[in-house]
Amino acid sequence: MTGTVCLTFDVDGGEAQRYAAPGEPALVDLSQISWGDFGIVRGLPRILELLRELAVPGTFFSPGATLDAHPEAFEAVLADGHEIGHHGHHHFHPAEIDAAAQEEELLSGLEAIRRRLGVTPAGYRSPAWQLTSVTFELLVRHGFVYDSSLMGDDRPYVATDGPHRLLELPVHWGLDDFPHFGMNASFAGPLRNPREVFDVWWLEIESAIADGRPTVLCMHPEVIGRSWTFDAFGRFVRRLTEDHRIELRTCLDVARSHTDRQ
Ligand SMILES: [Zn+2]
């Protein structure tokens, strides 16, 4: 059997963290914002260099406001042939804002990606994985090929909400770097040994190979891009490339294969 792995990166940046939900005061936590900025200036270039060296494709989800603040960073992502996905505009969590604000988030994020990069994203990942029925319907209405925010299976499936259907490339908190290495003023992460985490992820991948199912890994440049995690991450990705049973593909590539089989 073979297994597919999608390396995905949520490039939130500091810009998206300046905004509070409508009606709430803007965030003024410069430390939190600067941590997001680290992801742009240091984490993202490290990731791009690694993927370039190993000829590995990735999928990068970004809020529109972050793209507007750092267009050159995302031009570099696109120039390397990676996929760009939608990740809101101000990174508002859909479950925390009303229907009009959710639509504004979706349309503004779409417009920013089209204007800055000249591409239309086919995939969406909800900020904080807080997808709602309102945003789900908007994704279907605007022709998104897939979502990657839900956890209803451990392989691609068609998610349904009322009359609406959309291909889902599921995520899971355990396969996200933030619960293992992330830390901020409101979340004290365990700061685990990265070698242990990647060993656990490898167990998931071995299981996925046996099943022939794709695995979606979710990372953040400000988290995985710190030197102590990044060294181990680099060895992990190299191991993926050296295993002949594993294919590394973008989310859109996997989504198209899945749709073609329907
Ligand atoms: Zn995010």
Image (spheres, rainbow, N blue to C red):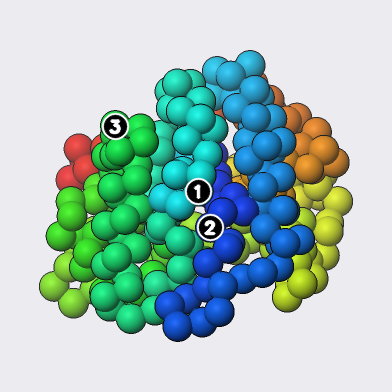
Whether residue 34 is visible here, answered yes or no, is yes
Q: Residue at x 24, y 50 (%)?
A: 144
**Which residue bears the numbered disc 1?**
66
Tell me which numbered mark, 3 or 2, is placed earlier along the sequence. Answer: 2
Residue 71 appears left or right of 188:
left
Q: Residue at x 59, y 50 (%)?
A: 13
Q: Residues within 10 Å of mark 1 (few under 14, many from 20)?
A: many
Q: Circle 3 — which element?
A: loop
Q: How far apart, in angstroms, are the residues tagged by discs 3 and 2?
A: 21 Å
Q: Circle 1 — which element?
A: helix
Task: Reply above or below: 186 against 83.
Answer: below
Quadrant occupied by the C terminus:
top left
Task: Reply above or below: 167 against 159.
Answer: above
Task: Reply above or below: 46 against 114.
Answer: above
**Which residue bears the numbered disc 2?**
16
Residue 182 appears left or right of 154:
right
Amino acid under label 1?
Thr
> Quick check: marks 2 and 1 in contact, CB under 8 Å?
yes
Residue 19 appears left or right of 85:
right
> Quick check: marks 3 and 2 in contact, CB under 8 Å?
no
Amino acid under label 3?
Gly
Q: Circle 2 — which element?
A: helix
Q: Residues within 10 Å of mark 2 (few under 14, many from 20)?
A: many
Q: How far apart, in angstroms, are the residues tagged by discs 2 and 1?
A: 6 Å
**Which residue bears the numbered disc 3?**
118
Instruction: Respond yes or no on whether mark 2 lies under 8 Å from ligand 1.
Output: yes
Q: Position of residue 138 (x, y in %)?
A: 22, 64
